Amino acid sequence: MISHQKIGLPGVLETAESIDANHMQMVKCKNRSDESYRAIAGVLKQFLKKISNRLELPIRSAAQTPQEETLSARQEADTSCAATSYYSIPFSRNRWFVGRTKKLKELEEKLITSDDCQKLALVGLGGVGKTQAALKLVYIVKEHRPEYSIFWVPALSTESFEQAYRDIATRCSITLNPKEEDPKESVRRYLNSDLAGKWLLVVDNADDQEVLFGKADEHRGVKDYLPESENGRTLFTTRHREIAVSLVGSEVVVLQEMDQKEAEAFLAKSLTQKELLDDEADTIALLNELTYLPLAIAQAAAYLNVMQISIQEYLSLLRNTEQETISLLSREFHDTTRYKSSAQSKNSVAATWLISFDQIRRSDSIAADLLCFMSCIENKAIPRSIMPSVELEEQMVHAIGTLRAYAFVTKRGDGDSYDMHRLVHLATKVWLNMQDTSRKVKEEVAIHLAEIFPSDDYTNRTIWREYFPHAFQFLRNTKMLDGDARYDLCMAVGKCLWVDGRIGEAVDWLSECFLWRRGRYLEDHPSRLAAQHELAMVYQAGGQVKEAVKLLEQVVAIEEKVLKEDHPFRLTSQHVLAGVYQADGQVKEAVKLLEQVVAIREKVLKEDHPSRLASQHGLARAYQADGQVKKAVKLLKQVVAIREKVLKEDHPSRLASQHGLARAYQADGQVKEAVKLLKQVVAIQKKVLKEDHPSRLASQHVLAGAYQADGQVKEAVKLLEQVVAIQEKVLRKDHLDRLISERALQGLYAQQRS
């Protein structure tokens, strides 16, 4: 007979029974028909009958394997868990919790009230309050559904998960035998059994794929140890939608930032100085700055409580500089409702996403690169076309999907542009500084933006207008960045701003480019001369003609030293300088210089070469300005005749020559000829150019002037009214072309009245 040895279960739950066999006989059972096996099974059945009669428990089926019978005996002996609910919750109630009523109701209905959902994921941006919402649900269930045991398991790491499972084993008196099986497996089997009763399991911070799903050939993941029982319900909280779908399929609930009322109530609960809320405008402004993110509000409240400053003072710090904002949002604060001493659970807004950034870098390097790129430009309305290209389109789709899955990026309506969360935008900069890669990333962004920024061709205006905010944001925040790429971007932006009529801004960026190149390159360096040339042209457009003359005279003087007289760059600069002379009233100087340019080009270029024709056109304009109208008409007729031979009727250069000839006709008193030619030009442009194209508007304006000169004032008014109406839609109030048109129209109105 074996000795009676108990294992230490409480009270009536443990008894000693005799088996007519010794230890040697007990371990020699070959199969179920073995006599020793039947003897042991018989005694166990009698024991289970006694227990079931005493506690009214169902008797297990005898059709079990020896291993299953052993487990059943162990579980049924541990009946205290079936009679009592157990709780393993690491946090007390959050007395600062407010709102989220609809989401909590949805979670409770899906998980607890309904029988259709056994697993559910709560998904949202880091710091949006997923853990706190889950904690609130847990205490609602504990209070109103006492039949549920509640177990809280952090999935921050394999170690945190295993420690939580050990705590469950202790609380439920689950016997663990390390020699027999993994403790986590023991808990899983227990929760899968009927003896566990009803339970709610919260798997918090399920964000790390390796922790959740394991690493190939190394270890099993958390998911392998999660129970699946009809009596149980599992709630996951995660930042990553892809992980959520992998765990629960379509049973996903998304948690967004708080609404204004919830945010105001949360701030009020969190502040010790309630009088700070008296200024409603400042309160709302603060919540807007913090994007209604609960963690950001909690952090701001903690700062206000400790430093005892006003909301207005905090706002001033928050809005001061990007560095000030990052410093504020990087400050840790004490919070009893969050995990302690965890690198993966930080209490500052700037740090709360760092672990996610690292996870993205490990799992999707293209998404990480995209995140870095976006942090260097404006965070709103980011066009897909401005993003760095990758080898395969599917890779880009996946990368954007990764960032959207973490809620770092959201798509704008049905378009092809994206918004990046403002605080994530700032936090990414913190991450880059921590990685010591901020400068390298900015250099790469400068190269990319300089390469893809559109040319100043007016047909690109839709693209460059989309790109402007992002180029401005990058350029403003990289003033200390050295290198050609940044200043190539300054040049490209300045040229497009000029064509867009934003002359003042164009001067700013082109000046910055020129000053940098002047400090870096010798005076005859092509890049320096090009920047000086472009700046001079914009100065002229903005009415700073003297400055333009000075810059271009320097360019021409240098090029005359280092370039041959027929070099295209030298001739182009002389041509442009002549135009500036003309604008400055130095018409004789303009004519003299252009006659030189034309003479040289007539020697070295064919008669239909675009550059030769352009200089002849320019000389004709100078002749006209100098009162030599007959010469102007003669030269322009030659240009038009050649271009009509070699260019299609809708070619811009051909139309420009006809436009110029019409103006010369009008100056020469040939008004009928001017009207006839301009009507042709306008008719063709109407077919091929949009109504707001500058060339089309310019031709209509000149035609209106020709109508006026021809006595057709009503026609002139009608046409100019159309021009002004379109310019009011597309041009700023101070745009020179718009001002000229409006002034001309007022003159026509005055002529009509008289």
Image: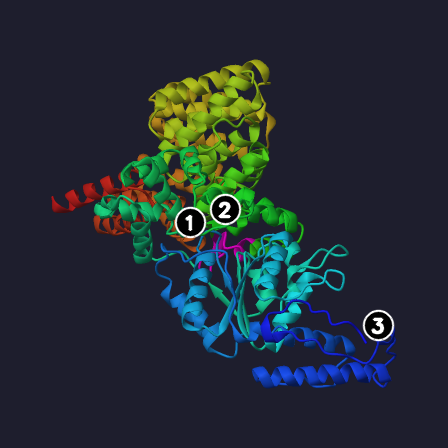
* Labelled disc at residue 352: 2
Res 509 quadrant in image: top left
Q: CA distance from mark 1 to mark 2?
A: 9 Å
Residues marked 1 and 3 touching at CB (< 8 Å): no
Q: Which mark is residue 295?
A: 1
Can residue 454 be seen by looking at this rendering?
no
**Residue 144, placed above or below residue 532:** below
Left or right of 197 in this view: 589:
left
Q: Please provide percent x and percent y for residue 331.
A: 44, 38
Label 2 neighbour load within 10 Å: few <14, some 14-19, many 20+: many
- What type is the residue that disc 3 sits on? His
Q: CA distance from mark 2 to mark 3?
A: 58 Å
Mark 1 or 3, nearer chain start: 3
* The N terminus lies in quadrant: bottom right
Residue 341 percent across, percent down from the top left: 53, 44
Does residue 113 lie above or below 183 as drawn? below
Circle 2 or circle 3, nearest the eye: 3
What kind of element bears circle 2?
helix
Q: Residues within 10 Å of mark 3 (few under 14, many from 20)?
A: few
Question: Residue 194: image x %, image y %?
Answer: 60, 78
The label on residue 23 is 3
Would residue 405 be counted in the magenta stretch?
yes
| In this rendering, position of residue 222 left or right of residue 453 | right
Which residues fall within the magenta stretch? Answer: 403-418
**Mark 1–mark 2 contact, CB under 8 Å?**
yes
